């Protein structure tokens, strides 16, 4: 169920479960490409995202193409 969050620009709806599912799917894809480690950091890692939050991911992958 979407969670109602208030932000500086009013009210926004964030579907936490859908976003977390998308993050997990992205992690699996970069692992298939050879990522050694994938780190989630920032507000999504802490469980405190706001309507203006982005998703911060660090990928450590020797030999992985620079662009995906």
Image (spheres, rainbow, N blue to C red):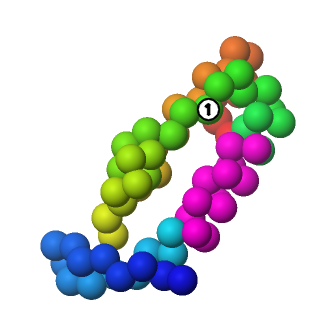
Nearest to the observer: residue 11 or residue 64: 11
Residue 60 vertical placement versus 15 (above, below): above
Quadrant where the N terminus lies?
Answer: bottom right
Q: Position of residue 33 (x, y in %)?
A: 80, 33
Furthest-right residue in view?
Answer: 32
Q: What secondary structure prevails in the magenta region?
A: helix
Residue 33 vertical placement versus 8 (above, below): above
Give the residue at x 22% y 73%.
7
Q: Is residue 26 magenta?
A: yes
Give the residue at x 24% y 77%.
6
Furthest-left residue in view?
Answer: 8
Residue 14 vertical placement versus 32 (above, below): below
Give the residue at x 48% y 82%.
2
Residue 14 vertical placement versus 61 (above, below): below
Q: Position of residue 11 (x, y in %)?
A: 27, 84
Give the residue at x 73% y 38%.
30
Circle 1 residue: 38
How many other residues sit within 10 Å of disc 1, few (<14), some (14-19) or many (≥20)?
some
The boundaries of the magenta stretch are 17-28
Quadrant where the C terminus lies?
Answer: top right
| Quarter holding residue 62 | top right
Q: Is residue 40 magenta?
A: no
| Quarter holding residue 9 | bottom left
Q: Position of residue 58 (x, y in %)?
A: 52, 32
Judge left or right: residue 42 versus residue 33: left
In this view of the protein, can residue 26 be seen by the observer?
A: yes
Tell me the element at label 1.
strand
């Amino acid at each position: 169920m979407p969670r109602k969050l208030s932000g500086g620009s009013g009210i926004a709806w964030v579907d936490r479960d859908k976003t977390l599912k998308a993050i997990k799917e992205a992690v699996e894809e970069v692992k298939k490409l050879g990522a050694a480690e994938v780190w989630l950091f920032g507000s999504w890692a802490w469980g405190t995202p706001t309507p203006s939050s982005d998703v911060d991911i660090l990928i450590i992958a020797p030999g992985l193409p620079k662009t995906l």
